[in-house]
Structure formats: C-alpha cells, structure tokens
Amino acid sequence: MVLQIIPIKTQKEIGIDVNLVDLILESSEINDGDILVFSQKIVSKSEGRILSLSSVNPSLLANGIASSYGKDPRLVELILSESKRIVRMENGIIIVETKHGFVCANAGIDESNVQDGYAALLPEDPDKSASLLKERIEQKTGKNTAVIISDTFGRPFRLGQTDVAIGIAGIEPILDYIGKPDTFGKVMQVTAIAIADEICSATELVMGKVRKCPIAIVRNYNFNFSNAKIQKLLRSRHDDLFR
C-alpha cells in the first residue's frame, strides 16, 4: 500500500469548543489505523488558549528583558509564565524550558495566524488533548486511530524550523533498532528513530502555514499502537550535553 498524507482544509475560523472531529468528518472519512495530525494552533484555539496581550500585566523582570531584547514586555511576561526556567537569551532570542518540559523559543507562544493583539499558548496538557481527540474519533466513527499534536520548533545546529510532536495518543513515538542487526549483521547500538516527529514533518508539507490546512491524515503507515506519552521523546537534562 502507498503511504498517503491527506490534507484537511477549512475556511472556518476556529473558536473555543469547536468540535475538531466534526470538522474532519465534514470532508473526509477516517479509517482504522489512520494517524491524525492536528496543528498546535487549532488545538489551542479550540481550548481557549488564545490570550489578548492587553490583559497581560508585565512584571519588572519582563520589562527588563523586553527592553534588552527589543520584545513586547507583555509577550515576555507570557513566556515567563509558561516556563520552568530560561535556558539562554541571546541575539533577541529567548530559549526556555516550558512547563511541559519542551526546550524551545518563546515557550512555544506564537502571534501568527491569530488576531492582532493576541497570542496563542501551547495546550495545557498536549497529551491529554491528543487523548480526548482520539476518544472522540472512536466515539464518532468506531475507528481505532492515533493522534499527534504538532508544532514548529527550531533545531540546534541547523537553520530553518520543522514540525515535531508535542502531544501523542495511541502511537509508539520511537522506532527502536537498538540490539537489532543491520544489513551487514552488525548489532545496532544507538539507532532510535523519532517517528512521531518525522510524521509531523511529513504532514507539514501539505499543511503549511498559510494554506488553511490545520489537520492531516496519515494513512497506510504501519506503526505500533501504544499508551506512550510525549515525555518518551524528551531528552533528560542528565543526557543533554548542551544544557
């Protein structure tokens, strides 16, 4: 079977409590074994994680950082409120560790594809968001699927951004080859492929940022069903050579 990536487009502006599963079913069928990838932005919008910057009261720390880095102090306050700690600040870039454990720029907070004067925050619990979507899909269709929530992150040592998984449900996120022989019979020691991230990157090719395509269905990919959480993809500080 041929691997398919099916874009789900919408002309609707997503608001709080919009049923994202109904949005899919308006134009597409869902099959057993499909992987549904939702953009972080559409999930955040449906969960009310869009805040008006006018409602934010910057702290002294936020004002100080903002003046040094040429940023809106209200946005900096949101970044601080969504973070465990600041990892590095340099060249106008603020890298933090979020409450979820993600190391990324601006705590994943984004002002694109939202109204002027507003910012989108990451879902409070992306794994829970993915699980709820998976449950709703099963209730509506009776199909067993996997769900991934994707977001766009930068990458150390390489230019450009790529989409990665920030929440998962029903899929084993890593394909582990450790202990298996390669094509020459040598036992592999370290190879573990982050398939959840690779799936997100693949779907971004059809979703884009300006195509009004916030959801994609990946079909005919043979994955392992699992109850794993996104933490399985996060490198611990102990094993991180750069933190």
Image: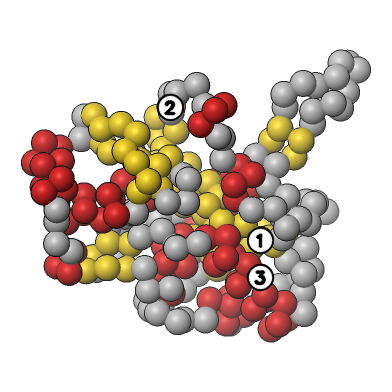
The amino acid type found where label 3 is placed reads: Lys
Residue at 67% of width from left, 75% of height from top? Answer: 135
Element under disc 3: helix
Q: Can residue 202 be seen at all in this image of the molecule? A: no
Residue at 15% of width from left, 41% of height from top? Answer: 65
Q: Which disc, if any, is residue 234?
A: none
Horizontally, residue 201 falls left or right of residue 141, namely left
- Mark-to-mark CA distance, 2 and 3: 34 Å
- Can you identify the residue that label 3 sits on? 134
Q: Quadrant of residue 112?
A: bottom left
Q: Quadrant of residue 117?
A: bottom left
Q: Quick check: 89 above or below 172? A: above
Q: Can residue 233 be seen at all in this image of the molecule? A: yes
Residue at 38% of width from left, 78% of height from top? Answer: 15
The amino acid type found where label 1 is placed reads: Ala
Tell me where residue 45 appears, x and y as whole percent: 39, 71
Q: Nearer the viewer, residue 206 or 177?
A: 177
Element under disc 2: loop
Q: Which disc, if any, is residue 169?
A: 1
For marks 1 and 2, the one nearer the N-term is 1
- Can you identify the residue that label 2 sits on? 243
- Mark-to-mark CA distance, 1 and 3: 7 Å
- Which label sits in the foreground, 2 or 3? 2
- Mark-to-mark CA distance, 1 and 2: 28 Å
For marks 1 and 3, the one nearer the N-term is 3
The amino acid type found where label 2 is placed reads: Arg
Kindly check if marks 1 and 3 are in contact, taking CB atoms under 8 A apart as contact: yes
